[in-house]
């Protein structure tokens, strides 16, 4: 396509006024559009006439000019019968003046097709005198058109957004339409007894797209209707909204693509096409069976033209049974596309029709809303048969049952069904599941699973890609929505399916890994323990337990039963004074662990150091520590101790009123690092080989630096110690870090 127009700068405003005069899009009056095209032809002839004696070169107009379908940036196709040298001189001058003519002179003036590619021979069809000649080449022209269409489809699918359509070369665009209309004339005998409706539709859509293409060119754009141009068109055409405009255009593109595909397929079928039509069933069950056996475009066409008749006798219950029969179990990809193109999905689910042509411009969605639902159906089938394409998350597909796959297919149909309406589409979509499944009399368990998946189909992608999948807060948010067990696996796999169906390029191995990491985290013992504790607290109506659980070290949750831990938290919350130290033995005798819990209603600087000194003074080594100040409770610290002493004796020691103030030993850490810092919190990491008194030395150092402890985690892994402290900022963090490193790091 030429990048420049033959119009002069002073012509643009006049052209826009002429084109829009009386325009009532989407109703395009052919006479008005033709008037504009003839005006363009006049302007072009004036430009060419100014270069030289244009008519003396015996020009033959081809392409859009010959069809009176010229647009401001159309290619200027010409055949010159005049002297070749003068033609070259004229064309060269035109190029230098910005007119890029696609011109040639024939090898043989008696046979204009000589030396011309078959596809270009079609351009001669506009010349009545050449139509007989063109018919001689129709088989070669048809073969070339088919090849060109296939290459164009591949190029468009891989290079452009389907939501910013190319009005000329895109699927259903002007090139498709013009080729279909030309083929109808070239193979007229094959279409004698065929309903002329498809070609009437193509002619109507062609007028609309010629109008839109001309307006695009007058805006300074090319043939691609970008998001920006779409918004501008709403103003020029005085339409209610961008959505209304694009719904109409996308719907017309789909119709044009369908009928153009049918015309090509009809010619390929030849004489067999008429016999096929005579044998075509007119009731739904055999029609579906026929579509399953042969889901090609010819079968789709016959079903689509009869879809209203097929729908008439069906009650809601029958629709549910038919949908089950059509989609449950393994289904071919082409059959799923056929259900969409025949409008059968709209017959079963009337709300589906509301999505036709609905677009979203967010640099992520690639398809219209209705096409996306079909893509999602196709991806469900791919997950079943080609799970390796989904990366690590694809492993979940191997665990699904037949019922699970049926659940996912129904979720695919309903998850975005409420888009374009009022309210949150996930919530409203769940309501549509209730409505349709009740009418179809589907099982309650199936309804609940699909309703839940539709209502929650976006939450895992948010958790996996925008939140910390290892965070207990993330786990809790998901647990609160019912994300667990079988439903977790179904939702995770559907999340991958939905992303691929939205934009396959957006699905990566990295995303698959992140999503699978989240699934593993939610299935982990730590997550299950948190869930068990939260469920116990909810059942027994323990207020604020959620907040407390998220603050505690997961090691503490793993070590205690919900009854022990939740009841102890409840007791601490209700206490009016400090609780006595509680000592608990966990596990079998040979592998038991002794835990000590300290509670103080009031937190103050040095409390943690005092507790550690107390343990150290009684010869009790600390293996793990979870240190927190909890709202409504105060200081609530658990220490896992290394000791062969019985729990009762340890409890007696720790509850003695005597003060223990041992000397802090001199120790060294391998590293002291600042993990993070902001205005609310500094987090330091102390790492080193296990030595007696390490934790006490670290706590003493923090007090010496005038830092108040917010929370702490201390763990001993074999001979390695990893202690983390969160403190209230005080002073300059760089100076504090340097002081700690000088004190401890060799």
Image (tube, helix red, strand yellow):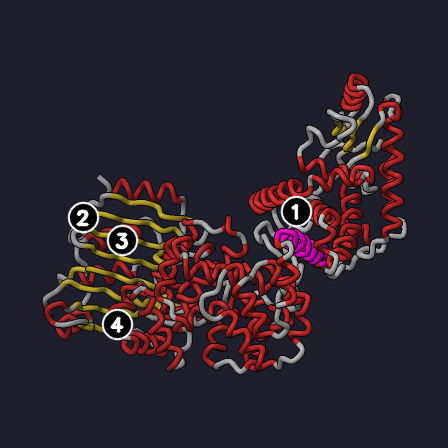
Which quadrant holds the C terminus? top left
Which is closer to the viewer, label 3 or label 4?
4
Which is closer to the viewer, label 1 or label 2?
1
Dot 1 corresponds to which residue?
Answer: 170
Of marks 4 and 1, which one's residue comes earlier in the chain?
Answer: 1
Under circle 4, the secondary element is loop
> Circle 2: is it few (<14), some (14-19), or many (20+) Cα within 10 Å?
some
Residues in magenta, as a range: 248-268
Residue 250: x, y in percent?
A: 68, 55
Which is closer to the viewer, label 4 or label 2?
4
The reply to whether discs 1 and 3 touch (Cβ–Cβ < 8 Å) is no
- Judge from the rendering whether residue 391 lies leftward or rightward of residue 428; answer left or right: left
In reply to whether residue 740 is colored magenta, the answer given is no
Distance CA(mark 1)–CA(mark 3): 61 Å
Distance CA(mark 4)–CA(mark 1): 63 Å
Residue at x 81%, y 38% (from the top left corner): 127
Residue 202 occupies quadrant: bottom right
In reply to whether residue 253 is colored magenta, the answer given is yes
Along the viewing direction, whichever of 727 and 584 lies nearer the viewer? 584
Residue 229 visible from this viewpoint: no
> Circle 1: is it few (<14), some (14-19), or many (20+) Cα within 10 Å?
many
Under circle 2, the secondary element is strand
Dot 2 corresponds to which residue?
Answer: 689
> Circle 3: is it few (<14), some (14-19), or many (20+) Cα within 10 Å?
many
> Circle 4: is it few (<14), some (14-19), or many (20+) Cα within 10 Å?
some
Residue 162: x, y in percent?
A: 62, 50
The reply to whether discs 1 and 2 touch (Cβ–Cβ < 8 Å) is no
Of marks 1 and 3, which one's residue comes earlier in the chain?
Answer: 1
Dot 4 corresponds to which residue?
Answer: 560
Which label was assigned to residue 723?
Answer: 3
Q: Is residue 7 above or below residue 569?
A: above
Residue 201 occupies quadrant: bottom right
């Amino acid at each position: 396509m030429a990048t420049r127009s033959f119009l002069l700068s002073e012509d643009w405003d006049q052209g826009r006024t002429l084109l829009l005069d009386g325009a009532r899009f989407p109703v395009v009056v052919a006479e008005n559009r033709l008037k504009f095209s003839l005006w363009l032809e006049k302007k072009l002839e004036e430009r060419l006439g100014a270069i030289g004696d244009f008519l003396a070169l015996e020009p033959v107009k081809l392409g859009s000019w010959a069809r009176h379908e010229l647009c401001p940036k159309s290619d200027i196709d010409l055949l010159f019968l005049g002297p070749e040298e003068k033609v070259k001189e004229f064309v060269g001058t035109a190029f230098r003046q910005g007119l890029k003519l696609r011109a040639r002179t024939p090898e043989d003036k008696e046979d204009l097709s000589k030396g011309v590619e078959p596809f270009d021979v079609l351009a001669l069809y506009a010349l009545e005198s050449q139509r007989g000649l063109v018919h001689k080449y129709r088989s070669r022209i048809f073969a070339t058109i088919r090849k060109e269409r296939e290459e164009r489809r591949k190029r468009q699918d891989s290079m452009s957004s389907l939501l910013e359509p190319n009005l000329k070369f895109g699927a259903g665009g002007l090139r498709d339409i013009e080729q279909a209309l030309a083929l109808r004339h070239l193979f007229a005998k094959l279409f004698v007894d065929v309903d002329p409706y498809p070609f009437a539709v193509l002619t109507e859509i062609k007028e609309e797209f010629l109008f839109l293409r001309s307006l695009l060119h007058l805006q300074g754009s090319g043939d691609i209707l970008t998001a920006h141009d779409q918004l501008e068109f709403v103003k020029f055409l005085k339409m209610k909204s961008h959505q209304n405009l694009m719904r109409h255009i996308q719907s017309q593109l789909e119709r044009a693509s369908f009928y153009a595909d049918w015309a090509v397929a009809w010619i390929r079928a030849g004489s067999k096409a008429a016999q096929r039509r005579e044998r075509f069933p007119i009731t739904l069950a055999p029609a579906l069976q026929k579509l399953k056996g042969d889901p090609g475009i010819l079968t789709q066409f016959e079903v689509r033209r009869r879809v209203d008749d097929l729908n008439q006798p069906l009650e809601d219950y029958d629709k549910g049974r038919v949908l089950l029969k059509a989609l449950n179990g393994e289904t071919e990809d082409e059959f799923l596309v056929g259900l969409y193109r025949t409008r059968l999905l709209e017959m079963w689910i009337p709300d589906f029709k509301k999505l036709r042509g609905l677009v979203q411009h967010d640099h992520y969605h690639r398809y219209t809303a209705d096409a996306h639902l079909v893509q999602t159906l196709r991806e469900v089938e791919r997950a079943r048969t080609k799970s390796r394409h989904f990366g690590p998350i694809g492993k979940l597909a191997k665990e699904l049952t037949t019922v699970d796959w049926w659940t996912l297919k129904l979720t695919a149909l309903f998850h975005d069904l409420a888009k374009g309406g009022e309210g949150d589409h996930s919530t409203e979509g769940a309501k549509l599941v209730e409505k349709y499944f009740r009418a179809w009399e589907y099982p309650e368990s199936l309804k609940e699973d699909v309703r839940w998946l539709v209502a929650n189909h976006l939450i895992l992608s948010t958790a996996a890609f925008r939140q910390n999948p290892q965070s207990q807060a993330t786990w809790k948010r998901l647990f609160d929505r019912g994300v667990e067990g079988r439903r977790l696996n179904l939702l995770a796999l559907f999340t991958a399916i939905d992303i691929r169906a939205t934009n396959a390029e957006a699905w990566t191995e990295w995303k698959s890994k992140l999503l699978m990491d989240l699934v593993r985290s939610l299935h982990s013992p730590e997550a299950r323990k948190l869930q068990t504790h939260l469920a116990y607290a909810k059942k027994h109506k323990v207020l604020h337990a959620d907040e407390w659980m998220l603050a505690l070290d997961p090691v503490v949750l793993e070590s205690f039963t919900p009854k022990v831990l939740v009841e102890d938290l409840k007791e601490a919350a209700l206490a009016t004074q400090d609780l006595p130290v509680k000592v608990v033995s966990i596990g079998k005798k040979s592998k038991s662990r002794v835990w000590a819990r300290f509670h103080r209603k009031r937190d103050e600087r040095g409390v943690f150091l005092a507790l550690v000194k107390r343990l150290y003074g009684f010869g009790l080594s600390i293996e793990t520590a979870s240190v927190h100040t909890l709202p409504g409770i105060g200081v609530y610290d658990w220490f896992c101790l290394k000791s062969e002493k019985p729990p009762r004796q340890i409890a007696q020691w720790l509850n003695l009123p005597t003060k223990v103030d041992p000397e802090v030993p001199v120790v060294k850490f391998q590293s002291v690092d600042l993990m993070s810092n902001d205005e609310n919190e500094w987090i330091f990491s102390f790492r080193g080989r296990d030595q007696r008194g390490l934790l006490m030395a670290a706590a003493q150092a923090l007090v010496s630096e005038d830092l108040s402890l917010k929370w702490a985690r201390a763990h001993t892994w074999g001979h390695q110690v990893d202690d983390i402290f969160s403190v209230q900022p005080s002073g300059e963090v760089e100076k504090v870090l340097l002081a700690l490193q000088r004190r401890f790091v060799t």
